[in-house]
Image (spheres, rainbow, N blue to C red):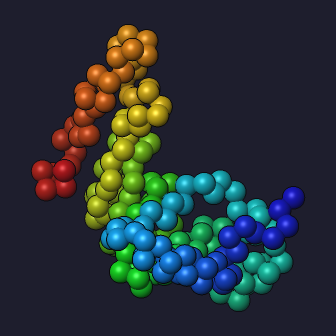
Amino acid sequence: RCGSPQLDPTGVVYDAFGRLLDEFSTLLQDDFVHIGGDEVFSYKCWTSNANVQKFMQDHNLTTELQLRSYFEQRVQEVSAQRQRSNLVWEEVFTSGSYLAPSTYVNVWLNYDSLKAAVTAGHKVVFSYGFYLDQQLPPGGTHYLWVDTWRNFYLNEPFPDSALTPEQQ
């Protein structure tokens, strides 16, 4: 049972996000803001809400993906208005949601997403195979858990030549 959506895509969340960025900008001088986007697996809490249903109807949004794209676009705009570069998890890219051309994609699941994002013109932060907290990079371990560091050093970001040197 959903009740009210946690991040209601119909309005107030964008003002709250903007105020949060304004407050953090006095503390953090980074040019980037990672706006996430990978934790939403189901939009039933959005689409089962009467206010959201009306909003979708009023804005000619007929699918969950269109609503997600609207949400992602608005969040990216709020961040960009504050001269921050957006960074999203690869799930936002692979879902087909809206991404501004200047949005960076944080690829952490597979090489195919890296190639697709770069080919689509996005810059990429590549973390696939470098998750130190998981200790199981691609290729398995060399000796139980003792020397998995080898896998991190052996992780090849471009295992084939599908990308041009400029894209790499």
Q: Measured from the top left, where is residue 16 in percent x and y?
A: 61, 79
Q: Nearer the viewer, residue 158 or 87?
A: 87
Q: Measured from the top left, where is residue 20 in percent x and y?
A: 55, 76
Residue 95 showing in the rendered view: no
Q: Measured from the top left, where is residue 134 in percent x and y?
A: 47, 31
Residue closest to the far bottom: 58
Residue 3 showing in the rendered view: yes
Tell me what residue is drawn at x 26 percent, y 40 percent: 157
Quadrant of the rendered image containing residue 45: bottom right
Total numbered circles: 0
Q: Quadrant of the N terminus?
A: bottom right
Tell me what residue is drawn at x 70 percent, y 74 percent: 8
11 left or right of 168 in image:
right
Q: Measured from the top left, where is residue 52 in percent x and y?
A: 75, 78
Q: Nearer the viewer, residue 143 or 19?
A: 19
Q: Nearer the viewer, residue 110 or 66?
A: 110
Tell me what residue is drawn at x 25 percent, y 29 percent: 153
Tell me what residue is drawn at x 39 percent, y 14 percent: 146
Quadrant of the rendered image containing residue 121: bottom left
Quadrant of the rendered image containing residue 124: bottom left
Residue closest to the far front: 27
Q: Nearer the viewer, residue 34 or 124?
A: 34
